[in-house]
């Protein structure tokens, strides 16, 4: 906990588990402790059932796909699937890693199992691009010395389930969808295991030098049993026999009998019969004591004896399909009225619930008494939407099961929260009508996780119309007005679109609602636009961003904007948008030349956000903040309709896709962001690009699809990648305070490739001081004065010397930025800085900036990455009005008429004259190109009639292919 307090973002609570992974919940209960562990994305959570305390074990980069515990519950093994995968053996007492195996497979792990003696571990890799799957046997407590034996299978049926033979540690069984394999392995007692794990990852051998690993795959034909047999799901050996079982997606089990004598081949099996044990797919096969235990998608857990006769059944949990069954190591409990006995066990279900069951429940008569104890309830299914609550520390979460949940402080979710009725709501809704709403129990309204709404259609987006009315945008294009307190619709639903709704927003007065759908159409509805003042009327739709996706829509005061991937900011005419005329556009504004926005949010105060964000409503603000594909933040002023500042965005995790501004309890403003690289992060205001004022952590194994902030306290950030897990992050802005011992130059220099010791920093320093001499006159004989400052008029020349050629727009924005900083230091009002900006270029000679200011300016404004071949190819494609960039017919480079290229330079973007183009070409190609030509010959006329992007780059710009 003390370590968490030092972090700007620390994982506080995890809601839900990876319910789609078979075996993702395991019991650690014994005589002294009552613990369970479960997988939540890339985190292993060890959960104290008595206190609800979570221990969150982090170390994996990818989603954990395998969870196994040793028979004595002392070790927990986790493995993930993906690049840079890991296998970690955790000590269940200390919760520290006991063994770590890094990247043994190129694509990670598919499945694994621990032998009943707890000494050996069998792993199977996920198939690589060549469909090769690798298998290995390891010693659990000595992974570093490499596998005991290995082998690989190429191009076969992917094996995704594995189980040791409890009677023979040298045997295990695997299965894919259509085949089962019986394996045996041997290691010479005197030999050591092979070299190392890196060599193992690259070998493609029948078996490793240290041991042998072989398998037999018996043939199976469903026609032999005169019935259809589903896909294989899981396999297990029956203790005390040579029989094995494989479950199927039809609810059957295939019984494999020993055929060693028949086929004269040791370990061989044949399918003797197929038995129906469930009516739906069986996902879990386990052996407990003398019983075979099955868990299936029908939500039932059944116990069978060694002759596969049904002995006991647990079928009243009403918690969803069973994906995990795990028993405690406590002594089995005997039923009072039947000979059945078993240890306490927990099940995990596809609806995100963990239920504890015990043998005595089998004696109960009523359905309610046999349901067991719901230890905790997560979000059923996938997360499809998330929004923070107004004026309280809580979040609203929607799922693909048609449900909407409220998760409130203190963010608990265990011990039967919500009552037993909630578990069946999804199935009830699917059977009933779309508008059938089920209110939560009164007791759950005060608990951490509660059900707010249940319908048939999936809720895809949400917004608060008022403190009580929640707007719900549905997958079928309908918009619902739902009263959270009354648990009923506050207004009849409105059909908005035939496509799925993606986002909904409303103005501060709650009189106008805007939405957009999957087809990138924007819709407006108004209150009282028709005959009835209390009725919402559909105004119409408009597609302002042609052939481009909408990034965001927002109200800024009384104005409605949409932001598109086409780089346009569209302002809508709300007064002119009527029932008669439909939706009208007032203004199109290009955010910046070549800028492709990826996220948008609002903030108030000064241009860099230095004035604290004081409001709770998200539609109050005077500035828009854009993140773009080039790794920049761009501040856009809504009054002057133009860019005012460019800041380097954090380089963690790629392109930023989500942003939100909030204020901490201490009044400090902050930007929360989520990137497409699985991260969530913070940037402390004011926005100046300081790397010491930002941070990011890997939040989920996949892209963070949903993020919102707790505006009531400023203390939490909520995130989800959409796969049933919601992470709650505690915010500590004190950790983002820059070190006072480091200067700005020292802090920002870390953003250069080689820091202050590199050539780039040396060039910046030399050019800056040379600029001072140039201003004083290079040929002057007067004494030199090194002031440490240069006039603002020198900045464009300095940038060019460093390889950054400013456009007219770049220079305007940079000038605005510098003047604002100058005014802020002199304690002037922002409006005064704006007046200075309008006085003209002559003022640039009177404004001086220091080396520190210039260095910060350069780091923020310079291109994050240079132009590449793909950029030029795309530019040529756009100029030729070809929508798909990258090449012409038959893969040949796309060609463009030189006349058309010159015309585009003269007419589009920041226009050039032909005289300016001539000067540029002469500088690029040299004056020798005109030798032997008649006087008055233009350089343009000497260019080839057609150009492709490669010849343009190499022959004209002088670039060489790397």
Image: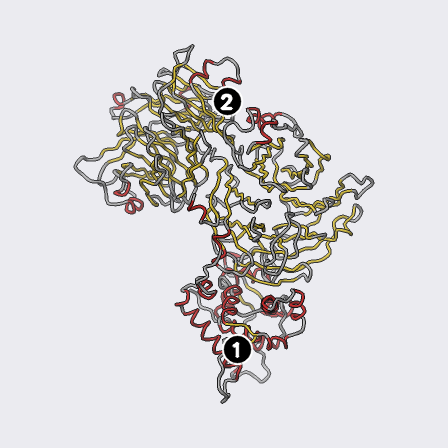
Q: Give the CA separation, mark 1 to mark 2.
A: 79 Å
Say whether residue 233 is left or right of residue 839.
left
Please say if 952 is above or below 74: below
Does residue 56 appear in this view?
yes
The residue carrying mark 1 is 923
- Disc 1 crowd rating (10 Å Cα; few below 14, some 14-19, many 20+) is few
In x, y percent, where is residue 159?
A: 38, 34
Q: Quick one: label 1 or label 2, which is nearer the N terminus? A: 2
The residue carrying mark 2 is 317
Instruction: Quarter of the image for the C terminus: give it.
Output: bottom left
Say whether residue 239 is left or right of residue 645.
left
In x, y percent, where is residue 438?
A: 63, 27
Give the residue furthest to the bottom: 781
Q: Is mark 2 on a helix, strand or loop?
A: loop
Does residue 173 appear in this view?
no
Please say if the residues under marks 1 and 2 sit with CB atoms less than 8 Å apart. no
Q: Quadrant of residue 540?
A: top right
Which is closer to the viewer, label 1 or label 2? 2
């Amino acid at each position: 906990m003390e370590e968490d307090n030092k972090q700007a973002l620390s994982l506080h609570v995890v809601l839900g588990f990876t319910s789609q992974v078979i075996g993702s919940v395991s019991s650690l209960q014994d005589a002294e402790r009552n613990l369970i562990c479960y997988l939540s994305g890339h985190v292993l959570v060890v959960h104290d059932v008595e206190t609800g305390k979570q221990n969150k074990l982090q170390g994996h980069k990818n989603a954990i796909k395998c969870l196994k515990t040793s028979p004595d519950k002392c070790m927990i093994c986790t493995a993930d699937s993906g690049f840079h995968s890991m296998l970690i053996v955790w000590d269940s007492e200390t919760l520290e890693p006991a063994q770590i195996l890094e990247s043994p497979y190129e694509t990670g792990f598919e499945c694994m199992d621990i032998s009943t003696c707890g000494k050996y571990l069998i792993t199977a890799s996920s198939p690589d691009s060549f469909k090769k799957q690798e298998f290995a046997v390891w010693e659990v407590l000595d992974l570093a010395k490499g596998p005991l034996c290995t082998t690989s299978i190429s191009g076969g049926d992917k094996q995704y389930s594995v189980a040791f033979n409890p009677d023979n540690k040298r045997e295990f069984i695997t299965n894919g969808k259509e085949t089962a394999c019986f394996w045996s392995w041997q290691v010479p007692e005197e030999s050591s295991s092979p070299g190392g794990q890196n060599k193992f990852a690259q070998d493609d051998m029948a078996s490793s030098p240290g041991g042998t690993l072989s398998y037999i795959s018996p043939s199976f034909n469903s026609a032999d049993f005169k019935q259809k047999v589903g896909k294989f799901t899981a396999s297990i050996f029956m203790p005390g026999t040579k029989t094995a079982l494989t479950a199927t997606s039809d609810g059957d089990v295939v019984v494999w009998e020993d055929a060693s004598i028949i086929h004269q081949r040791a370990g061989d099996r044949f399918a003797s019969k197929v038995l129906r044990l469930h009516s739906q797919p069986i996902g879990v096969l386990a052996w407990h004591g003398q019983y075979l235990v099955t868990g299936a998608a029908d939500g039932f857990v059944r116990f069978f004896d060694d002759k596969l006769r049904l002995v006991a059944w647990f079928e009243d949990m009403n918690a969803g399909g069973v994906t995990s069954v795990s028993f405690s190591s406590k002594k089995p409990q005997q039923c009072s009225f039947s000979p059945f006995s078993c240890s306490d066990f927990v099940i995990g279900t596809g609806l995100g619930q963990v239920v504890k069951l015990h043998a005595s429940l089998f004696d109960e008569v009523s359905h309610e008494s046999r349901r067991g104890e719901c230890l905790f309830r997560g979000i059923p299914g996938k997360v499809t939407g998330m929004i923070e609550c107004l004026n309280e520390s809580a979040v609203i979460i929607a799922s693909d099961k048609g449900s909407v949940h409220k998760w409130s402080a203190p963010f608990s979710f265990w011990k039967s929260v919500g009552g037993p009725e909630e578990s069946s709501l999804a199935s009830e809704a699917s059977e009933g009508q779309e508008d059938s709403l089920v209110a939560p129990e009164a007791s759950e309204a005060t608990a951490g996780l509660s059900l707010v709404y249940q319908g048939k259609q999936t809720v895809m987006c949400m917004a608060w119309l008022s403190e009580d009315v929640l707007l719900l945008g549905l997958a079928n294009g309908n918009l619902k007005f739902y009263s959270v307190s009354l648990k009923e619709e506050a207004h009849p639903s409105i059909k908005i679109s035939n496509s799925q709704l993606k986002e909904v927003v409303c103005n501060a007065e709650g009189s106008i609602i805007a939405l957009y759908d999957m087809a990138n159409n924007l819709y407006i509805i108004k209150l009282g636009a028709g005959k009835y003042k209390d009725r919402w009327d559909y105004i119409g739709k408009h597609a302002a961003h042609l052939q481009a996706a909408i990034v965001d829509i927002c109200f800024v005061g009384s104005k409605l904007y949409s932001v598109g991937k086409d780089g346009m900011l569209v302002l809508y005419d709300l007064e002119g948008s009527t029932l008669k005329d439909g939706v009208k556009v007032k203004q199109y504004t290009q955010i910046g030349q070549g800028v492709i926005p990826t996220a948008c949010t609002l903030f108030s105060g000064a241009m860099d956000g230095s004035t604290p964000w004081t409001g709770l409503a998200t539609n109050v603000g005077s500035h828009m903040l854009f993140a773009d594909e080039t790794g920049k933040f761009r501040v856009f002023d809504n009054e002057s309709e133009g860019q005012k500042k460019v800041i380097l965005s954090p380089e963690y995790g790629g392109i930023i896709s989500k942003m939100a501004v909030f204020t901490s309890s201490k009044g400090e403003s902050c930007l929360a962001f989520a990137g497409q690289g699985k991260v969530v992060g913070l940037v402390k205001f004011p926005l100046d690009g300081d790397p010491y004022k930002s941070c990011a952590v890997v939040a989920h194994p996949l892209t963070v699809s949903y993020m919102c902030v707790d505006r009531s306290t400023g203390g939490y950030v909520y995130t989800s990648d959409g796969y049933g897990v919601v992470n709650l992050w505690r915010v500590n802005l004190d950790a983002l305070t820059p070190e006072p011992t480091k200067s700005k130059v020292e802090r920002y220099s870390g953003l250069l490739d080689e820091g202050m010791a590199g050539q780039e920093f040396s060039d910046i320093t030399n050019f800056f001081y040379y600029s001072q001499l140039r201003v004083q006159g290079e040929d002057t004989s007067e004494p030199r004065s090194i002031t440490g400052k240069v006039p603002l008029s020198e900045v464009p020349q300095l940038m060019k010397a460093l390889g950054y050629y400013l456009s007219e727009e770049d220079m305007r924005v940079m000038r605005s930025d510098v003047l604002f900083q100058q005014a802020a230091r002199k304690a002037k009002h922002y409006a005064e800085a704006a007046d200075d900006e309008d006085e003209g270029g002559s003022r640039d000679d009177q404004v001086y900036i220091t080396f520190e200011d210039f260095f910060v300016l350069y780091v923020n404004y310079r291109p994050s990455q240079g132009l590449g071949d793909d950029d030029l190819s795309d530019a040529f494609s756009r100029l030729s009005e070809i929508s798909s960039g990258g090449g012409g017919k038959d893969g040949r480079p796309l060609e463009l008429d030189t006349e058309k290229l010159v015309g585009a330079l003269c007419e589009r973007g920041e226009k050039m004259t032909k005289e300016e183009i001539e000067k540029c070409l002469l500088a690029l190609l040299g004056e020798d190109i005109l030798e032997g030509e008649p006087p008055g010959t233009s350089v343009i006329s000497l260019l080839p009639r057609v150009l492709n992007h490669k010849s343009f780059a190499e022959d004209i710009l002088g670039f060489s292919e790397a």
